Amino acid sequence: MKRLAVFDFDHTIIDDNSDTVVRDLLSPDKIPPSLKQLHRKDGWTSYMQGVFQLLYEHGFRKNDIQTAIDNIKPVYGMTELITSLKLELNYDIIIISDSNTYFIDTWLNKYNLTKNIDKVFTNPANFVNDILNIQMYHLQTECKMSTKNLCKGRIMEEYIDAQKKDGVTYERVIYIGDGMNDLCPILRLQEGDLACVRVNYKCAELINLLELGQPIDSSGKCYKIKSEVFTWKNGCDILSYVRNKFV
Ligand SMILES: Cc1ncc(COP(=O)(O)O)c(C=O)c1O
Ligand SMILES: [Mg+2]
């Protein structure tokens, strides 16, 4: 029977944040306060659209952005983890990320991983007249834990349901992430699934609070995690754990 591995991208597969790497091609004094305001008011996707416009105005072109993305290093052991899950251990692999399609497709291509990823769910982006154009993946208000443009939990559940309708039922789901936006999908995992969270990053910190029975947001709700939780430093840790645990 098939298994599913769901990966976050920034600070999980790659050891950096693709948005900030590309933004930092500009020196900080090139970013006007009005754009910083937009970040606060309309979220990260609108902010990045402003950054892409500024990059164009300051002479940065597609190849400069591509080079910046190509130069981001993977987290140690992650490319091996993806390859082994896909080719040896019968996992389908999807990525759900708040980055964008151009960054993720570019990076996967550079590291020869495109063929090992079944689907990427992220904000659509493409070049129009030499400026990178980004859109929100969706617009949602139901999940208060997620940003308005991307509820990873909903995307993961919809993918699992769609696969079931196509005759593919997963015996187990593994989720691998680091950030605040990875908590929603982790809370939707079932008993027998596995949440892998990066040590000393935000998601692990929130899960520690939940395990102590403490609230993590203003709702005061005590969320409960049904899956097992494994804390990782690199991709090799996860691969050893999965091999020992499940094979
Ligand atoms: C600037 C920025 N971009 C992207 C992300 C999320 O990207 P991903 O979902 O790939 O971790 C975050 C949140 O962690 C962020 O702060
Ligand atoms: Mg992340």
Image (cartoon, rainbow, N blue to C red):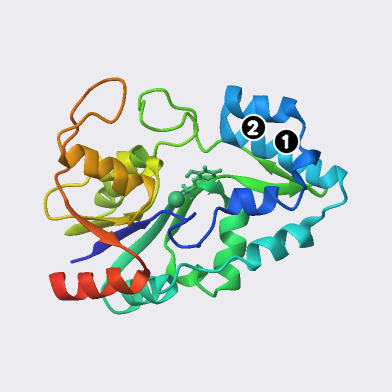
Answer above or below: position of 97 versus 16: above
Residue 230, horizontal then vertical, whole percent: 22, 59
Residue 109: image x %, image y %?
Answer: 58, 69
Q: Amino acid at mark 2?
A: Ser
Badge 1, how many Cα within 10 Å: few under 14, some, many 20+?
A: many
The reply, left or right, for residue 143 in relation to residue 52 is: left
Locate the N terminus and report the quarter of the image it occupies.
Answer: bottom left
Q: Provide the residue designation for mark 2.
A: 46
Query: Mark 1 touching mark 2, by CB under 8 A?
Result: yes
Residue 39 at x, y percent in the picture: 61, 30
Residue 141 vs 54, above or below: the answer is: above
Residue 50 - label: 1
Q: Residue at x 65, y 34 (%)?
A: 47
Q: Residue furthest left?
A: 191
Q: Residue at 40%, 74% (x, y): give it.
A: 77
User: Left or right of 111: which side holds 209?
Assistant: left
Pinpoint residue 237: horizontal percent, then vertical percent: 29, 71
Q: Quadrant of residue 135?
A: top right
Of residues 215 and 74, the one nearer the viewer is: 215
Quick check: 47 left or right of 150? right
Badge 1 amino acid: Gly
Instruction: Look at the numbered disc 2 and give the secondary structure of its residue.
Output: helix
Rendered position, 93 above or below 153: below
